[in-house]
Image (tube, rainbow, N blue to C red):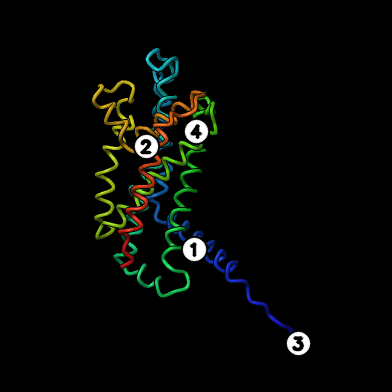
């Protein structure tokens, strides 16, 4: 006679979350939009910028650093922003529009695990892309790795938390997947401008620099640049980024609708 032992509820829950995360990752890759924009496009920009000879020459305005060294943290912010403001809210708002969240509420899986799986997928893709940018920059264009790695990781995690909180807020308030995509796009370009994608923050007029300091990505990029140069990020830069994560995270939790 044989007996079967049921898995403990906690173990079953972790197993279910793991399968759901793997499924969401397969869907993310299958859709192709996320991998192309969130992974491929930042690497393409790095290759384009790295191919410009003047971008690899030390500049007095940047304290002897090259323009490419200044742009690597901006490209990392670009990766985080495009995943958090485009892929994440579009998927979640689309799930709500199709009734997937409502149906999940009636299953043991629950919508909270779906949110956790979505955040895990986007964090994982962000980590892979950041590592790829740093490795390609170092190997192909001799861009130094961050000289203050702990500060760099802290700044990157806070930037990801802040932007994904904004993305969840968009998903909470948008009426459809298409509306979420539109709102995310409207937010993306101004944020990237003040992050220094088109004009480095140090070369902006004074008024624009002040505005940049108050946006989610301006302080995040400056913190990443300081850590890349070997300095711990300013407390103000980390606090502003953390404040966005807390405020928009709480607002998203309060306003999020499952159906």
Q: Are marks 4 and 2 in contact (CB under 8 Å)?
A: no
- Residue 132 at x, y percent in the picture: 50, 38
- The reply, left or right, for residue 76 in relation to residue 188 is right
Residue that badge 2 annotates: 240
| Residue appearing at x 50%, y 43% in the figure | 127
| Residue appearing at x 43%, y 26% in the figure | 50
Q: Residues within 10 Å of mark 4 (few under 14, many from 20)?
A: many
SS at mark 4? Answer: helix
- Residue 66 at x, y percent in the picture: 43, 19
Q: Nearer the viewer, mark 4 or mark 2?
A: 2
- For the residues labelled 4 and 2, the Cα–Cα distance comes to 16 Å
SS at mark 2? Answer: helix
Q: Residues within 10 Å of mark 3 (few under 14, many from 20)?
A: few
Q: Nearer the viewer, residue 91 or 52?
A: 91
Residue that badge 1 annotates: 20
Q: Residues within 10 Å of mark 1 (few under 14, many from 20)?
A: some
Quadrant the C terminus occupies: bottom left
Q: Are marks 4 and 1 in contact (CB under 8 Å)?
A: no
Quadrant the N terminus occupies: bottom right
Q: Nearer the viewer, residue 37 or 124?
A: 124
- For the residues labelled 3 and 1, the Cα–Cα distance comes to 35 Å
Residue that badge 3 annotates: 1
**Residue 73, quarter of the rendered image:** top left
Q: Are marks 2 and 1 in contact (CB under 8 Å)?
A: no
- For the residues labelled 3 and 2, the Cα–Cα distance comes to 64 Å
Residue that badge 4 annotates: 152
- Residue 216 at x, y percent in the picture: 34, 38
């Amino acid at each position: 006679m044989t007996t079967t032992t049921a898995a403990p509820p906690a173990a079953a829950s972790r197993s279910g979350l793991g399968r759901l995360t793997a499924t969401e990752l397969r869907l993310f890759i299958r859709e192709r939009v996320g991998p192309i924009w969130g992974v491929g496009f930042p690497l393409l920009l790095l290759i384009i910028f790295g191919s410009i000879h003047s971008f690899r020459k030390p500049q007095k305005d940047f304290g002897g650093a090259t323009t490419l060294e200044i742009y690597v943290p901006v490209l990392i912010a670009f990766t985080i922003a495009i995943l958090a403001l485009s892929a994440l809210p579009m998927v979640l708002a689309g799930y709500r529009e199709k009734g997937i969240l409502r149906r999940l509420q009636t299953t043991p899986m629950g919508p909270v695990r779906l949110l956790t799986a979505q955040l895990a997928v986007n964090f994982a893709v962000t980590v892979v892309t950041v590592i790829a940018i740093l490795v390609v920059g170092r190997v192909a264009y001799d861009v130094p790795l961050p000289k203050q790695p702990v500060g760099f990781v802290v700044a990157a995690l806070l930037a990801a938390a802040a932007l994904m909180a904004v993305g969840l807020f968009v998903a909470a308030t948008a009426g459809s997947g298409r509306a979420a995509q539109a709102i995310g796009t409207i937010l993306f370009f101004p944020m990237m401008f003040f992050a220094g994608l088109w004009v480095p923050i140090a070369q902006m007029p004074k008024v624009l620099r002040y505005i940049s300091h108050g946006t989610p990505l301006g302080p995040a990029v400056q913190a990443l640049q300081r850590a890349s140069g070997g300095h711990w990020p300013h407390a103000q830069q980390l606090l502003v980024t953390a404040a966005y994560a807390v405020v928009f995270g709480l607002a998203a939790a309060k306003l999020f609708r499952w159906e």
